[in-house]
Image: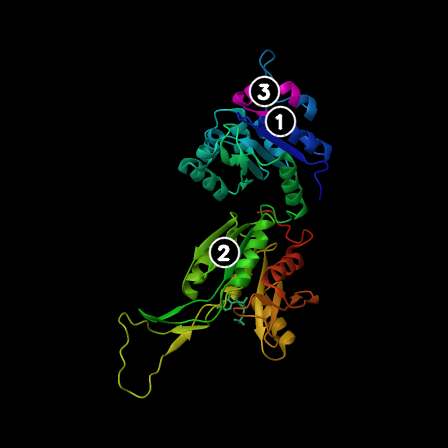
Amino acid sequence: MSLQGKHIVLGITGSIAAYKSAILTRLLVKKGAEVQIVITSAGKEFITPVTLSALSGRPVISEFFTSGDGTWHSHVDLGLWADLMIVAPATAATIGKMANGIADNMLVTTYLSMKAPVFLAPAMDLDMYRHISTQRNIEKLRGDGIYIIDAAEGELASHLEGKGRMEEPENIVATLEQFFATGHDLEKKKIMITAGPTYERIDPVRFIGNFSSGKMGFALAEECASRGAEVILITGPSALSASHPNIVRVNVESAAEMYDAALQNFPQMDAAILSAAVADYRPEQKSEEKIKRSGKEKFTLSLISNPDIAASLGKIKEPGQLTIGFALETNDEEHNAMKKMEEKNFDYIVLNSLNDPGAGFGHDTNKVTILSRNGEKQSFALKSKDEVAKDIVDNAFGNGKLTMDN
Ligand code: C5P
């Protein structure tokens, strides 16, 4: 998807780099975008609204009201009109205000009303940029789901060399094009993913676990988040980290904890992907003290059944909610997977092959067949788990299949 016809709110703040915003406006307009500029009072000291309105073909907005005729500029309407907002250049002051919701000008007020994704291209002196408070605010905004176009290194207006230059307009345009091209088909969808193993405690130092690394679930979480979804990743113990700001990670240890977290979150979700390797059984009794070697030849551990998270979600699933499960079968694979889909009320089931080298637990690759409730079947080659995640998401949610609005 190109920028043709896209509605873009361009926020401009008081930085020397504001001259680059004129070029940015020109490039966006050339690509067919409609650009509405919102500029701060300080921004106008660096570049005039006359230049910007001539380039964008629209009056530049700076104040809440036009002085003279009293026309109100609705930040709420702008928030609904926009397909994307970008603040470029973003000064330390504006970044601080945005991070803390200090809506004392038209630009930050527009940001707080924004329904569309928001990008920031910071520009400032190197010491200001690396200052702990600037970095804290940037991280806070990243955590709020704002896309940060990192400042570049080079010569600064202060004649010092370092990191703080606003990224070049050509590169900003390329980033925005890339953003629309990757398809934000899951924008605002809420997706819960279970991942990793569970640990079932035997005593304070021992547990029953499995070799699941969490890689498939984490790859699914990154894929869904990069397509705009708000992801809740409920994971058993895993060394992996989730990097996308749209992922909220919930750490659990046992199947019972995973069950509680999953059941609590699922009603608010559009979909759930159950990729965790949940222990079917746990010790009937957990010893509070470390179990000592008793000297006997035989030690018996009594196990009881864990709740089936997938099946429980299947029971409370509402129309419009989708669930996707995994199956690892050793014989009669497809038949058993279809049976599992029925029992757990999945809409799709991803069949992992145990017979292929490189597939399954711990590997970076996987080879899957995706079966749907209504009998569709697609088999894929051995691929990286990132690519498999894309295939699964395309198949189950692609082309607007995930349509329910919560
Ligand atoms: O029954 P089985 O364990 O083979 O089913 C696998 C599927 O069910 C996976 O999607 C897995 O995440 C899910 N599952 C679950 N809770 C369990 C056991 C399995 O959610 N207790």
**Residue 339: image location, x then y, percent:** 61, 73
172 magenta-colored: no
Q: Is residue 122 left or right of residue 305?
A: right
Mark 3 or mark 1, which is nearer to you?
A: 1
**Residue 302: image location, x then y, percent:** 37, 79
**Residue 332: image location, x then y, percent:** 63, 79
- Residue, disc 1: 37
Q: Is residue 38 left or right of residue 294?
A: right
Q: Name the kind of residue labelled 3 in the image.
A: Trp
- Residue, disc 2: 233
Q: Residue furthest bottom?
A: 297
Q: Which mark is residue 267?
A: none
Q: Quadrant of residue 172?
A: top right
Q: Earlier in the sequence, mark 3 or mark 1?
A: 1
Mark 3 or mark 2, which is nearer to you?
A: 2
Q: Residue at x 61, y 63 (%)?
A: 384
In the rendered image, the quadrant that contains the N terminus is top right
Label 3 vs label 1: CA separation? Answer: 16 Å
Find numbered disc 2 in the image and state the secondary structure of the residue it sits on: strand
- Residue, disc 3: 72
Q: Name the kind of residue labelled 2 in the image.
A: Leu
Q: Mark 3 near mark 1, Cβ–Cβ under 8 Å?
A: no
Q: Name the kind of residue labelled 1 in the image.
A: Ile
Magenta span covers which residues?
37-52
Mark 2 or mark 1, which is nearer to you?
A: 1
Q: What predominant SS class does the magenta segment belong to?
A: helix
